[in-house]
Every structure is written in C-alpha cells, then in structure tokens.
Image (spheres, helix red, strand yellow):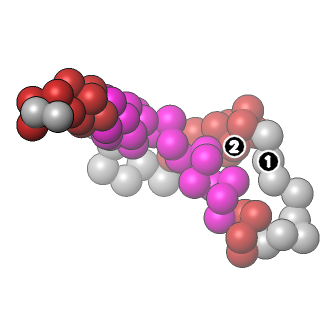
Amino acid sequence: MRASEGRPAAAGALLARAAGGIVWWAKGVTGESKYQAYVDHERRAHPDRPVMTEREFWRDEHRRQDANPEGRCC
C-alpha cells in the first residue's frame, strides 16, 4: 500500500471535522446553542424541576434581556 492511498479518506475526515467546528461556532455566535446549554444544566443541576420548552425559554430570555440590557447593540 502506498502512502498516498490513505490521504483522500484522511482529507475527508478533516474536512468533516472542520465543517462540524464551523457549525458549532455559528450556533454559539447566533445563540442557537443557548437552549441546549440550559437544558443540559437543568437536567444536571436541578433534575427535580421541569425544563421549560424552547418557546418558554426564548420568551424568558428576551424578557430578561429587555429588563436588563447589558452591552447589546440593539
């Protein structure tokens, strides 16, 4: 087996990993990962409490941001 035969698979894996990193970064920048972080925290730290639905979470998040604008641009 020549050394170059394994390179396409390795390049594909590297590209897939890079794409996954970009998606992870974009979700963090847009705030999309906030709800999942909330769910993970609630299940770990407060397993006895019910978890808000995603809709309830975002309503609460926006209410808190409007009540306490901290460094937001708009």
Q: Residues within 10 Å of mark 1 (few under 14, many from 20)?
A: some
Residue tagged by mark 1? Answer: 52
Q: Secondary structure at mark 2?
A: helix
Residue 74: x percent and y percent? 34, 32
Pointer 2 with pointer 1, Cβ within 8 A: yes
Q: Residue at x 81, y 53 (%)?
A: 51
State how far apart marks 2 and 1 are (Cα). Answer: 6 Å
In the picture, measured across the screen, residue 60 lies left or right of residue 17, that is right
Q: Secondary structure at mark 1?
A: loop
Residue tagged by mark 2? Answer: 57
Q: Which residues are magenta?
A: 16-41
In the picture, measured across the screen, residue 48 lies left or right of residue 53, that is right
Q: Residue at x 58, y 39 (%)?
A: 62
Give the prevailing secondary structure in the magenta stretch. helix
| Quarter of the image with the N terminus in it | top left
Q: Earlier in the sequence, mark 2 or mark 1?
A: 1
Quadrant assignment, res 14: top left
Q: Amino acid at mark 2?
A: Phe
